[in-house]
Image: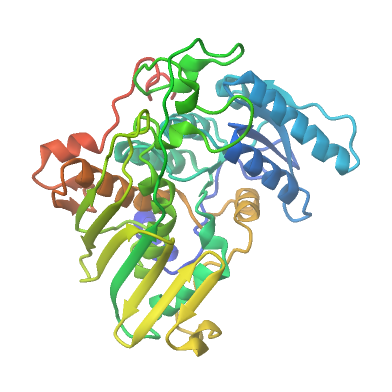
Amino acid sequence: MKRKTFLKTSLAAGAAFTVLPSGLWGSTRKNSTMQLAQIGTGRMGRGDMINAFNEGWRSEVGARMVAVCDVDLKRAEDGKKLLEKNYQEKGETDVDIQVETDFRKILDRDDIDGIVISTPENWHALIGVYAANRGKHIYLQKPLTYSIPEGQELVKAVRRNGIVLQTGSQQRSSVYFRQICTIVRNEWLGKLQKIEVVIPTDRGRADGEPTAPPAGFDYNMWLGPSPELPYIESRVHPQDRYGRPGWLQVNQFCLGMITGWGSHMYDIAQWGNGTDVDSGPTSIASTGKFPDRGLFDVHVNYEGDAEYANGVIMTSRNGNPGVRFICENGEAYCQRGKMECSDPALLRRRPTEGEIELYQSTSHMRDFLVSAREGKDPICPVEIGHRSNTICVLHDVSMKLGGRKLNWDPVKEVVVGDDEANKLIQMPMRAPFTFENYA
């Protein structure tokens, strides 16, 4: 069977696809214990780092967090202290945690086996491709990338180098989402007809005047491939705490809730529809509001409509986040910590022989670490992360074009007959922060 066909078939059935990465432990790697590095030690990064640290202690995993990196030296040093504190609680008082502000100095080390990337999303693709080209396994916070072409480059780099990448769509490792998608995929309620996706709304505003960046903060590196902007703390991240950063609502670093939560919920919609591996909607139209909120310029409220080749209609709006599947003979609904079904007995039903049994994971980070050790795809590999993010980006482009309907070719990955829209799905990269220089 050809590689592409096998990948599509095995992942669609919920199975793990063995990629035989160059970094299989016990073959080419020197380390019997995986050596991990954390890239980005802000609000999400600190949580991801300690999650990887804790899961690494499990006997079936065998991983250690040994290095941290952040362009803000204060945050990098804080990350080191947090790791040391956790090691001390495990009984280790003499640990050597490397601190860097340039991720390349860590990824160029031969003794680093894997990384966790928790940076602003305008950096995801460059760090991911750089890491993949050096044989490092990757846990990458969602959304996978900022733009669709970046996602395509990352998919190619991961498969070309045979490494494992887990997209941080951790809802897949929850029984609530897996069981509802199992119900839908097996058509226990009849054929799927409609999907309703709901995500939260961004709020507030930010103002401020340009100042010099703080000492120890490489602001130009933080901007990376994004256009130059004067430093204003309120649109970057707070210096005195680890609260929600301003960049999450600034368009050139992030597309807002459409990717922040949309990447979670569209991932589940795709999983239930069986279109998560190499497909997606054939059309999308979305309207959104972009009110004056000072430095914040991403959308707030939005509504969207999409259609799949199999006839399934998907609607989107703001509200309490969740996904509802409407089928011929009933409905099934999931959100974090909750699932509902018009036939409650199906919430306990398990697939029998011949039915679809989706990949089961109870810990997203542990699944990544075990998958990297065993050389198999995790529950949310790079292609799936790319396809869910594609839906987010297309909704954003349609909003920016005033609700224009986009006819999407999920095979060629282009908007059919719309040059303006195809330009908007890309992100021009500011030199020298390009794939050519970060290969």
Q: Is residue 344 left or right of residue 421?
A: right
Residue beneath the point at 51% across and 83% down: 351
Residue beneath the point at 44% across and 37% down: 248
The colour scheme used to paint the residues is: rainbow
Q: In this picture, is 6 found above or below 425? A: below
Location of the C terminus by quadrant is: top left
Q: In this picture, is 231 found above or below 204? A: above
Q: Which percent across, then down, holds residue 122?
A: 41, 31
Residue 47 versus residue 239: which sits nearer the camera?
239
Residue 356 versus residue 3: which sits nearer the camera?
356
Q: Which percent across, then down, holds residue 335?
A: 49, 66
Q: Which percent across, then down, holds residue 84?
A: 80, 33
Residue beneath the point at 52% across and 32% down: 131
Location of the N terminus by quadrant is: bottom left
How many dots with numbers? 0
- Asked if residue 1 shows in the view, the reply is no
Q: Which percent across, then down, holds residue 407?
A: 14, 53
Q: In this picture, is 3 found above or below 396? A: below
Furthest residue to the left? Answer: 417
Q: Quadrant of residue 348?
A: bottom right
Residue 399 versus residue 370: which sits nearer the camera?
399
- Asked if residue 242 shows in the view, the reply is yes
Q: Is residue 326 left or right of residue 360?
A: left
Q: In this picture, is 430 found above or below 120? A: above
Q: Is residue 106 left or right of residue 163?
A: right
Q: Is residue 294 left or right of residue 73?
A: left
